[in-house]
Amino acid sequence: MKNLKDTKGITLIALVITIIVLLILTGITIASLTGENGLLSRATEAKDATKRGDLIDRVKLDILNDKAGNQGNASNLSTILGKYFTSVPQDLTDMTAELTAKSEYGGYTVTLGEVLGEAVASNPPAGGTSLKVGDTDLSTVSDISTMYGETTDYKSTSHPSINWQLFYADSSNYYLIASDYVPNAELPCNGSTVNGVTYTATDLVKSTSTTNQHTTYCARFASSSSYNDGVLTTGTIYKNGSASTAFTATSGSQYLTTNYLKWVAANSSSTNNNICAVAYMMDTSKWSSFADGVSGAFAIGGPTIEMFVNSYNAVSTHTTKLGTYETVDSNNSNTNGYMTKKGDGSWTSYVSGLDTSGTDGNMWVRTSQTKAYAYWLASPSSNNASSVRRVIFNGYVNDLNAYSDTIGFRPVVCIPK
């Protein structure tokens, strides 16, 4: 019989140790697969990150395509964001605002800054606004008129590619003007959708002119002298004695009207078409998308004649000065708006000889005839009850019928100091 002591085999202790080691290795393997930092978790995170990145890329591509189709401006930004996300914040300047994707796009949460990138500059809040030209803070400039015409650091969220020049400043506000004609696809023209707002037949009418690019850059207040559409449509708030509605939108517009549009303020119940057209240009709600970069700012459709004259005359290099502007007095049969006093003391409905120097004119007189022959001023004409003041490429300031379709718009943004 064989001695059991000589039998080779595994002891109970060795078996227990082996099982324990296997259990430990199994636990480590399971943990590496399923823990918070496990392989499966990291694989899921990588998959989610890829899908989230794809979502961001899709949104950015849509914004780029929209900008390409609208002369460099993402005019339908809110609409694009609404396609992918459950809600879109009103304030599109807060890059930390969170957006939750719709379920069909994964339900991921991203920040506004992630989808916009650096396309929109952040602007300071109103009240002590640090508006700059280059590295120069305008609040530190003793003679602000020396900065007129300079490009500022202001950017509109809805119109990020538009540059804004310092047009004028008073004790309370800076006034910035679009450095060039704004494409009519971004203006409050009927049929346009800007920043999620679709404009109707009671808004501006796009030009139908086939001259150069006027169909792209020009807009008017009605399609013809019959005024059967657009701003001058019978029955809108800009007709039949109710133009004053436009002057009660905000305290800012009231201030502007009181200080820079005295004639219209005094005649806001007028039924003249020129007053109705100018009232539309003064309606801050219609032009709000241009002033969405700074809280407290508001925008109008163009500078007033007072702003224009004060700004132009303040520049020392403008040797030919504009005469004083004034309302038509009781001795004149035309009582529809402004006239200008010439050097000989006589009154006229136009001025000429403004500085048109520079590659494409200067801030005050744009000479891009391929875009528009002139831009509208937010002031009525003294010529007749249907004309609005304008600044022409050849250095004239006069008036033209409100339904002319060769005139463009250069909105003005008012920023409180």
Image (cartoon, rainbow, N blue to C red):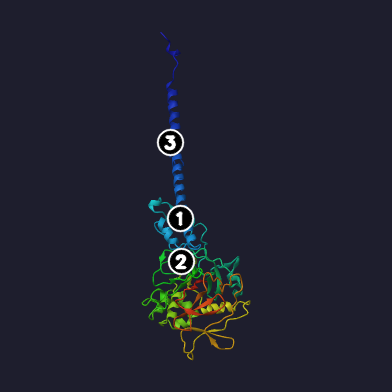
**Which amino acid type is shown beneath numbered disc 3?**
Ile
Q: Position of residue 240 (x, y in %)?
A: 38, 80
**Which amino acid type is shown beneath numbered disc 2?**
Ala
- Specify few, some or many for label 1: CA neighbours under 10 Å numbering under 14, 14-19, or 20 or more: many
**Mark 3 vs mark 1: which is more N-terminal?**
3
At mark 1, the secondary structure is helix
Q: Quadrant of residue 273?
A: bottom left
Q: Position of residue 213 (x, y in %)?
A: 50, 68
- Specify few, some or many for label 3: CA neighbours under 10 Å numbering under 14, 14-19, or 20 or more: few
**Which amino acid type is shown beneath numbered disc 1?**
Val
Q: Position of residue 162 (x, y in %)?
A: 52, 66
At mark 2, the secondary structure is helix
The correct choice, above or below, for 304 with respect to 191 in the image is below
Please state which of the two labelled residues, at mark 2 or mark 1, is closer to the viewer.
2
> Residue 185 bears which disc, if any?
2
Please state which of the two labelled residues, at mark 2 or mark 3, is closer to the viewer.
2
Q: Is residue 52 left or right of residue 164?
A: left
**Mark 2 vs mark 3: which is more N-terminal?**
3
> Residue 59 bears which disc, if any?
1
The correct choice, above or below, for 230 with respect to 117 in the image is below
**Mark 2 vs mark 1: which is more N-terminal?**
1
Q: Residue at x 40, y 73 (%)?
A: 230
- Residue 69 seen from this side: yes
Q: Which residue of the protein is positioned furthest toward the top in this rendering? A: 1
> Residue 30 bears which disc, if any?
3
> Residue 5 bears which disc, if any?
none
